[in-house]
Amino acid sequence: MKISLFSLFVLLAIYSSAQVVNPADSSLTPQEKRYRDSIAGINQQSKNLAEAQTAYNNGIKQFEAKEFGKAILSFSRAIELKPDFIKAFINRAVAYTENKEFDKAYDDYSKLIAFNEDIARCYYKRAETSTLGGNYSKAADDYNILIRKSPSDYKPLHELGEVLFLMGKYEEASKTLTKCLELNNKFAKAYNDRASCNRMLGKYQEALNDMNKAVLFDPKADYAYNNLGSLLKLMKQYIPAIDAYTKAVGINPSYFIAYNNRGSVYLLKEQADKAMADFDKAIQISSTYVPAIINKGICLHRMEKFSEATKLFDEAIMLNPSGGDAYMNRGISREMLRDDKGSCADWQKALELGIEGAKKYINANCN
């Protein structure tokens, strides 16, 4: 088959055009090419910086809207475009923490420490992230680093004491908090926390001494009055306990935990009406607070309102299926309603969930 001259000319033209060197390139000297490339690089860098800032701003808006997953993606894009974007790393770490991705938050704070960016604050935040994630050993390691870096600073000693308490190392925690108080002998929170250690160690009088100092140095500390009340309740000093809880809710009228705790003391004193009023108040403030719902059920049971009590225990179980107390108490109320099968099933479930007192009821009432 013959190819026409015209076709051959087109093919040659196409082939030739593929070999043509850009005339503009060929006319530039090496120095001019380097300048051109430098300008292109600067332009690209400026574009990346602008895009990084836009991504960062989007991340801030998404974080404020509590869209933590989206915020993480935006901050990650900002970091991709600007690998040393410190604020993006900080805010991504916070977003990871809010999203309960504690390991990733830990990694971001580690990168910030490597950048040497506000290093003390990053150690604190990394330790806080470890605590929230239940990795208390890592948190303790970071607080110990801070203590070595600033031996005259009482704050990391306090934080370490709290972590040691969470680890169940009450004696060591107490000693650490004593060192903290040697550096700041008016630190109410440390007295409160050392009191918690002493309470767990059975040193009630020492704990009481510390709690009295806590409320002395911070008369507005609602949590300290609540804890003082709980300690006095444990020591069976019910009237002073009620006074302490009353001070707690006087400082903070929304303190539903203190209302519930005061109600439990009224219940011990067989003042059912006052107990019921406190449990109702606690539930009014926080409708999902299970201890108050259970306590109100116990109060109704003692008032021989067994069906109403059972309904409250049902509600508590729906809110917290892994809590044995509600099963235990529902079993007792069901027994009074002659629901033997239901009561035995509840006591068995309570035992499975760690309520050892259920054994007595099972042995006495269930075949």
Image (tube, rainbow, N blue to C red):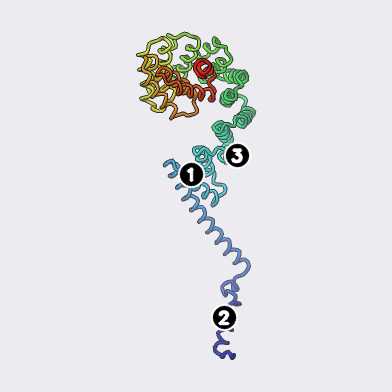
**Quadrant of the drawing holding the N terminus:** bottom right
Element type at mark 2? helix
Query: In front: 350, or 261?
Result: 350
Residue marked by disc 1: 69
Badge 3 or badge 1: first in the primary sequence:
1
Residue at left 49%, top 26%? 323
Q: CA distance from mark 2 to mark 3?
A: 57 Å
Three-letter amino acid code at the position of disc 3 = Ser
Vertical placement of 80 versus 121: above or below? below
Vertical placement of 24 versus 343: above or below? below
- In this rendering, the label closer to the viewer, 1 or 2: 1
Residue marked by disc 2: 14
Displayed quadrant of residue 160: top right
Instruction: Please rate how many residues cluster around mark 1, counting C-alpha atoms within 10 Å: few if below 14, some from 14 to 19, many from 20.
Output: some
Q: CA distance from mark 3 to mark 1?
A: 21 Å
Residue 110's label in the rendered image is 3
Badge 2 or badge 3: first in the primary sequence:
2
